[in-house]
Image (spheres, helix red, strand yellow):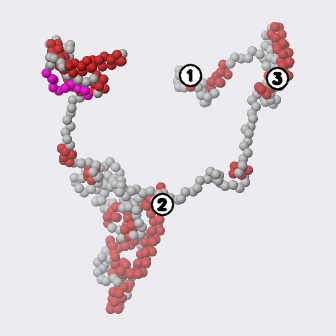
Amino acid sequence: MDSTSGQLEPASGARAAIPGEEYWPEGTSSRVRAARAPEPTGVSTGKPSFGKNPGSRRRKNKSSVSAPEASEMDMALIDQVEVESQEDSSDESKDLSSKYVVYQSEPEDELTGYELDKKVGNPHNFIDPKAKKPIEEPLTSEELWWNWRKPEKEQWSRWQRRRPDVETVFLKAMAETGQIELYGDEPTLTECALYRARRHIYKEERLQDEQERLDKIGPIAYYSEWVEAWERDTSREAVQKHYEETGEDENTQLIEMFTYQTDREYRIMMGTDIRIRRDPLAMRMREDQIKQIWGGDPVYPTINYIQDPNEVIDYRGPDFHEPTPNMLDYLKEHGKIITREELEKILAKEKTEVVEMTDIDEAMARAVDIGENDDEGENSEDEGVGEEDEKVRRNWSVVKTNAELLKPKSQTKPKKSSMSLDEAIDDSDNLTDFLLDFEEEE
């Protein structure tokens, strides 16, 4: 059915066949059946009321419809039907209820207690007291799923660790100074997110500690950290003693100390802008930590490239500037792989398996091909005699259930011309059992 025209259209192309009725959408078959219905022969005398007087199309209100070219016989039949219908109208009025579906509302159950209060709107509990379950004890922080951490012993940080950036390096430096505690050696993503949210607070804490330290030990001892060439004693007692001897106050001694400071030390101490308070953590950061963030010298990037000329570099991933881990060493270290010498030792200790020929192969090897050579016909009689000697001297039923008794013997016994009495009795028992068993199978 085409959605635009409302008609049955070919699925694709002008010659596409209309699919069978089982593939038509819902409602299409009834519309097609209605379209194929024949045109009514009679002519309607009434007019449609468009729903103003309901029930007007029921059978008791129908006026008889006659065909325009009806004969006198047809008219007589119609009159007779009308008379009968008038006689039956009294009976039909009684049976009207049986012709139409009468819908009965379902019997309402009487609500009590909680359900009644809920329906009417009385004050009631949010949860049905009967169905309410007791609240379990809250889980500990270790059991909560959002506190899940990677296990410590898992091999994780060798090539799957997060790349060092500002957040991870700062977190490790803060953990070294004791400002925070990290769960493992490497900061997790959660710890990085927490640091990102609180980094301003952490910086304020560090600046406050620095100010307290400055007030405690004095400016000369504090700033001498960034003046390596200053070799005098920087304690408060030494500064006071120097003041008493020479008359130079603390500020004069501080200015004299800064004359020994290099431009590199000044840049580390003050930063690029003297109006911005430097982060004490960044001021004291080691060179390897700085290179982890900024990659070292931009002209000759010593950190980002491997210096070993024989190193095989893996350019495939985003971390191609990091050395590729040696997977063989890792597998050996964890006992997943062993060397060839160890393997040969293990194999030498193991016993070599002796391959035994099965009974079927042995029987096939001993089988005689009848039709290939005529010369073998002469030897077949001798072999048949040898097979009779190799018969097991037991009952046939026992031989039948135990297949291993049918194995041919390795050495053939010499042929005996005469049989003893016991052997003859055993032989007759075997034959009797075999014949009885044969008859039962038939």
Q: Was residue 406 drawn as part of the magenta stretch in this picture? A: yes
How far is the residue under mark 3 from the one under mark 2?
80 Å
The numbered mark at residue 20 is 1
Q: Is residue 22 left or right of residue 401?
A: right
Q: Could you classify mark 3 by the number of other residues whose Cα lies within 10 Å: few (under 14), some (14-19), or many (20 or more)?
A: some
Q: Nearer the viewer, mark 2 or mark 1?
A: 2
Which residue is at the front of the view, 138 or 438? 438
Q: Which residue is mark 3?
A: 92
Question: Measuring 33% from the left and 62% from the top, which residue is drawn there?
Answer: 291
Part of the protein shown in magenta: 404-414
Q: Residue 419's spot in the image, x, y percent?
A: 18, 18
Secondary element at tag 3: helix
The correct choice, above or below, for 111 with respect to 386 in the image is below
Q: Is residue 264 left or right of residue 112?
A: left
Badge 1 amino acid: Gly
Secondary element at tag 2: loop
Badge 2 amino acid: Ser
Q: Which residue is mark 2?
A: 141
